[in-house]
């Protein structure tokens, strides 16, 4: 259960300025229903460049509704220049804070505002994912959004990036790229995975036995063959082919292209297999 502030609850239960606006001077739309969050922001801006009114339509959770409501309240009476200086932190602070896992709702508000002001200036709305590299395909998040969230909010971990942008919160395939972007923005070298410790002879022998019993032998038995492990001496593995494999003219290929290849992939790339 999220720990919402009283102000978040109030704006969720009684959202201000909800609904579409007739003949707005600017409209900004971000997110998508497919991604679970969407926000459409409408602005009325007078000739002096002052935002006289702001309304919204949103699809999302309690935080998305509260953040949208707060954004419209913040914008009323501000000049366009003042609005351009707003960030997601202003929305979160107005609400007395948001759960860290819900900070992406405030970022969505910042993005909708930027899109609306671009629309007001007569600039074409960017196509989805047109700006930057699409990093998170699950939620359609580009590196531009990720880099901005890192810089503006002082993010230091991939988990924080997910909280602020949702990137990495789906299948997780983009997490390595998120780590790279985080390191680039922070001016750090990407974290290197520690090199695996070399196997001891006992560990290598146990893994060889396991792979032969669970992977190699069952596969050979499907064709009437079999295999027996004879000896393991360091990285030299001696085996004896049985059944149909023992008389097969392709037995040497079986040893090198299947048995040795499998052991090298799953145990140790230095393994050499010979038949006895």
Image: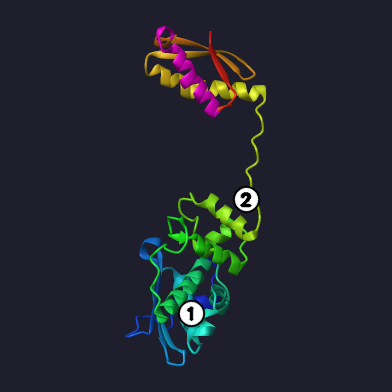
| In the foreground, 189 or 68 | 189
For the point 37% across and 19% down, the residue is 222
Image-quadrant location for residue 243: top left
For marks 2 and 1, the one nearer the N-term is 1
**In the visual, does 55 lie left or right of 101?**
left
Q: Please, which residue is most extreme toward the left here?
A: 22
Above/below status of 157 relative to 68: above
Q: Is residue 89 magenta?
A: no
Q: Could you tell me what secondary structure mostly forms the magenta stretch?
A: helix
Name which residue lies at 43% across and 55% down: 137
Residue range (magenta)? 246-266
Q: Where 138 falls versus 85 (above or below)? A: above
Residue 274 in sight from this viewpoint: yes
Magenta-colored stretch includes residue 248 = yes
- Label total for image: 2
Q: Which residue is mark 1?
A: 71
- Measured along the vertical axis of the image, is residue 166 above or below residue 265? below
Q: Residue at x 48, y 16 (%)?
A: 255
Q: Percent position (x, y) of residue 95?
A: 54, 77
Q: Relative to residue 124, is residue 232 drawn left or right? A: right
Packing grade of label 2 (10 A; few <14, some 14-19, many >=20) is: some
Residue 190 numbered mark, or none: 2
**Helix, strand or loop at disc 1?**
helix
- Residue at the image point whose x is 66% and y is 30% from the top: 198
Where's residue 249, x and y in %?
40, 9
**What kind of element bears circle 2?**
loop
Q: Are the residues tagged 2 and 1 within 8 Å (C-beta)? A: no
Q: Position of residue 194 (x, y in %)?
A: 65, 41
Residue 101 in view: no
């Amino acid at each position: 259960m999220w720990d919402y502030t009283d102000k978040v609850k109030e704006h969720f239960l009684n959202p201000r300025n909800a609904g579409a606006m007739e003949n707005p001077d600017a409209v900004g739309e971000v997110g998508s229903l497919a991604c679970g969050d969407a926000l459409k922001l409408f602005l009325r801006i007078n000739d002096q460049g002052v935002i006289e009114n702001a309304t919204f339509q949103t699809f999302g959770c309690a935080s998305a509704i509260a953040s949208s409501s707060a954004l419209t309240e913040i914008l009323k009476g501000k000049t366009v220049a003042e609005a351009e200086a707003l960030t997601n932190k202003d929305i979160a602070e107005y609400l007395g804070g948001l759960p860290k896992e819900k900070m992406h709702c405030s970022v969505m508000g910042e993005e909708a505002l930027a899109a609306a002001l671009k629309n007001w200036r007569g600039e074409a709305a960017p196509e989805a994912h047109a700006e930057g590299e699409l990093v998170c395909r699950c939620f359609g998040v580009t590196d531009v959004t990720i880099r901005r969230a890192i810089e503006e909010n002082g993010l230091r971990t991939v988990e924080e990036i997910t909280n602020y942008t949702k990137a990495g919160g789906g299948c997780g395939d983009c997490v390595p790229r998120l780590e790279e972007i985080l390191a680039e923005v922070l001016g750090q070298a990407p974290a290197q995975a520690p090199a695996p410790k070399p196997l001891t002879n006992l560990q290598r022998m146990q893994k060889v036995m396991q792979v032969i019993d669970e992977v190699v032998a069952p596969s050979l038995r499907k064709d009437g063959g079999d295999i027996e492990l004879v000896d393991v001496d360091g990285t030299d593995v001696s085996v004896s082919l049985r059944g149909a494999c023992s008389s097969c003219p392709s037995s040497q290929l079986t040893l090198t292209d299947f048995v040795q290849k499998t052991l090298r992939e799953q145990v140790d790339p230095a393994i050499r297999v010979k038949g006895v």
